[in-house]
Amino acid sequence: MIKKAVRYPDGNDRFGALLKEMIDGLETFARQRGVTGNSLYTDVRRLLTLGYDTYQLSDDDFDTVCDNLVDCIYKLQELEEIADKSCPLVSGKDETGGYDKKANSREIRIRAMHVTRDGVVGNSYSTDYYAGINQFDINPEQEIVLNSLDGGCVTLLAASEDAVTLKWRNEKYEVKFNTDVSTEECLVNNPHLSSDSLRLVFFYSNIPNYAELWSMIAKMGCDKLEEKEEKHILTARKEEILHFIDKAIEKGNTGLYVAKALLTEYNNWGTCEIDSLYCFRKALLEGIESGALAPDNYFGWEWMVVAAKNNDPAEFMEDMDLYYEVLDTAAGHGVGEAIDIMDSIWEPEQIIEED
């Protein structure tokens, strides 16, 4: 709302209406998130109320109100961080209560590592499998099915906060939290190769929350640019991050469809430049159909900013009518990111004419 309000060249009726909406929205936010007694909330509300009372007095007063509104953006971000610590945010429309951006859950990763030889040519590769831990149980007897060449089946015998117990080929393995355990290397009956040896590596950890996932993506991009690791290692890290993105989408964070579209295997993670426009468009359309760019989907618009900053947003969709509808709807709800993208694609006069 603030980003939309400061675009008005003078204090017209719509500017005042937006200020009133801001005050009402701030009061609702503070009440629901338990920060009505915080001094930062009091300060922001005082600035908004003062602005509502004085913006029509003179041009100088109007300019002062606009400057104060910009300052409020940073105060509101700080207030949201305070609210997140005291009352974590859950947003979304599904019956489970939505996506908790600070939530963590446990997961087992099983990495099947092969060393193969075909005549004189040697090679190595790995495949990852995942199993979620929904509850801690002494005897869950959960089977984790792998490809036959990757070992067939691993059984989860027990799970606790501290460790899990797994069984593979009549051997038991205790894997403590945030540690990995490797099996002995064994030969695989692979008729297609001269030799094929396999070992499994078990890892028990939290699924990263949104902030941790963002950090993983940023570090991955830096390492890609600086070529710190070999290509196959970077590829494995990409696949793991994309798995975590899919898990977040499953839990309700549909906004990450936009991140998934931008961070496909075929695009450049170091620069966030889109190399495969076809894959991007396909994934973005799937996300839009799931609500990724609904006006209240903060995560989706956050990633649209990243995509638009490093690429031409006019190329993001083939169906320009649908694209305009999505942007216009969000802009009508005060989503500044949507307004910026619209302004970069269409001249303001053209938007008015089309309306």
Image (tube, rainbow, N blue to C red):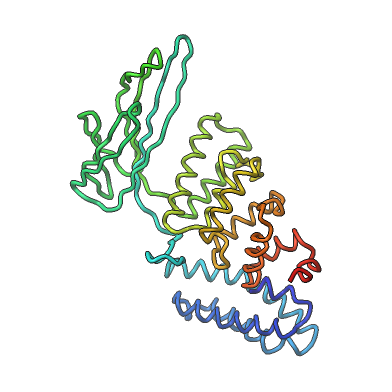
Residue at x 51%, y 46% (from the top left corner)? 216
Q: Can you tell which quarter of the image residue 104 is in?
A: bottom left
Residue at x 47%, y 9% (from the top left corner)? 120
Give the percent coordinates (x, y) of residue 40.
Answer: 55, 76
Give the percent coordinates (x, y) of residue 239.
Answer: 49, 39
Q: Is residue 89 visible?
A: no
Quarter of the image that includes the C terminus: bottom right
Q: Is residue 51 left or right of residue 89?
A: right
As rendered, which of 193 and 80 lies closer to the eye? 193
Give the percent coordinates (x, y) of residue 209.
Answer: 44, 54
Tell me: residue 317, above or below residue 293: above
Q: Is residue 101 visible?
A: yes
Q: Is residue 119 left or right of residue 268?
A: left
Q: Can you tell which quarter of the image residue 308 is in?
A: bottom right
Q: Can you tell which quarter of the image residue 267 is in?
A: top right
As rendered, which of 210 and 48 lies closer to the eye? 210
Give the percent coordinates (x, y) of residue 23.
Answer: 58, 82
Quarter of the image that includes the N terminus: bottom right
As rendered, which of 252 and 30 lies closer to the eye? 252
Tell me: residue 37, above or below residue 285: below
Q: Is residue 138 left or right of residue 176?
A: left
Name of the residue lying farthest toward the top:
120
Name of the residue lying farthest toward the left:
139
